[in-house]
């Protein structure tokens, strides 16, 4: 893939674009604090990620977790940043001190000393995620959706309450460039209730994790 340093695709431009989206984000407080973004990344960057020459995982096991398919997951690791310039540029953008400082100011997260972890996901029918809390070593979670097909409109992340039955109270609209931010905690129940997926549900998950994250191969 050719290196792309066009105006939209440079790390500085990606950072500015993301910060503009963050400044317009809607802040919902129930059932826990979360932020809904639109146009989170430049369209050309979204299209480049979605077009990465990475096959949709086959022979996938669906048991309500992502970890079961670790071998087929693609992370923005140093190796993949060298292979795909868009991975390098997006990683650099989220490492910008101004981006980190603004995220801390907006969300109240404490990200200093955290390490960056970005995953590219391609989910198909059969995929589901049980209501769950992110593990405690995750300091920050951002999901950005990459596909624009109208048929995927209901394929967004589900938000649940903290009751024993974890009732689904909202579904984030799945639209190209839309995103969801939350700070993992004791109430941030989320997942994906099993339902048909009309196509491929493409997204990236951006995490800041604590320095003692064990799976170092997942780190940017």
Image: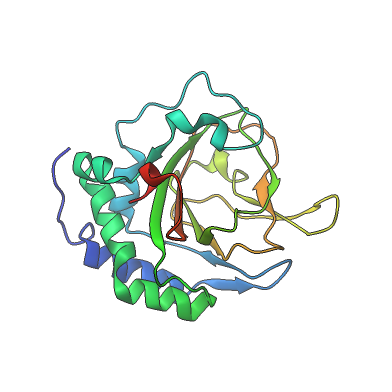
Q: Tell me where residue 218 appears, x and y as whole percent.
A: 39, 44
Residue drawn at x 84%, y 57% as measured from the top left: 163
72 to the left or right of 94: right
Residue drawn at x 43%, y 27% as measured from the top left: 56
Q: Tell me where residue 107 appears, x and y as whole percent.
A: 53, 75
29 to the left or right of 47: right
Residue pushed farthest right?
A: 164
Where on the picture, by quarter, is residue 66? Answer: top right
The relative height of residue 131 versus residue 62 in the rendered view (above or below) is below
The relative height of residue 26 versus residue 70 in the rendered view (above or below) is below
> What is the basis of the colouring in this image?
rainbow
Residue drawn at x 53%, y 78% as measured from the top left: 108
Q: Tell me where residue 174 appears, x and y as whole percent.
A: 55, 49
104 to the left or right of 162: left
Residue pushed farthest top?
A: 59
Q: Tell me where residue 120 appears, x and y as whole percent.
A: 41, 42
Where on the picture, by quarter, is residue 5? Answer: bottom left
The relative height of residue 46 versus residue 12 in the rendered view (above or below) is above
């Amino acid at each position: 893939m050719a290196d792309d340093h066009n105006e939209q695709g440079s790390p500085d431009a990606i950072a500015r674009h993301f910060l503009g989206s963050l400044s317009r984000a809607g802040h919902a407080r129930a059932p826990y604090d979360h932020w809904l973004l639109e146009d989170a990344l430049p369209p050309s960057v979204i299209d480049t990620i979605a077009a990465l020459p990475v096959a949709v995982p086959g022979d996938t096991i669906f048991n309500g977790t992502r970890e079961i398919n670790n071998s087929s997951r693609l992370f923005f690791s140093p190796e993949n940043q060298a292979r795909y310039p868009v991975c390098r540029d997006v990683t650099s953008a989220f490492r910008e001190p101004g981006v980190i400082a603004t995220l801390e100011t907006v969300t109240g997260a404490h990200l200093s000393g955290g390490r960056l972890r970005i995953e590219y996901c391609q989910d198909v029918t059969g995929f589901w995620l049980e209501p769950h809390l992110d593990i405690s070593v995750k300091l920050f979670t951002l999901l950005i959706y990459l596909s624009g097909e109208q048929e995927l409109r209901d394929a967004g992340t589900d938000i649940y309450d903290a009751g024993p039955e974890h009732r689904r109270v909202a579904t984030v609209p799945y639209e190209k460039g839309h995103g969801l931010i939350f700070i993992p905690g004791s109430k941030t129940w989320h997942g994906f209730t099993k339902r048909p997926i009309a196509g491929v549900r493409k997204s990236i998950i951006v995490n800041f994790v604590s320095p003692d994250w064990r799976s170092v191969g997942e780190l940017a």
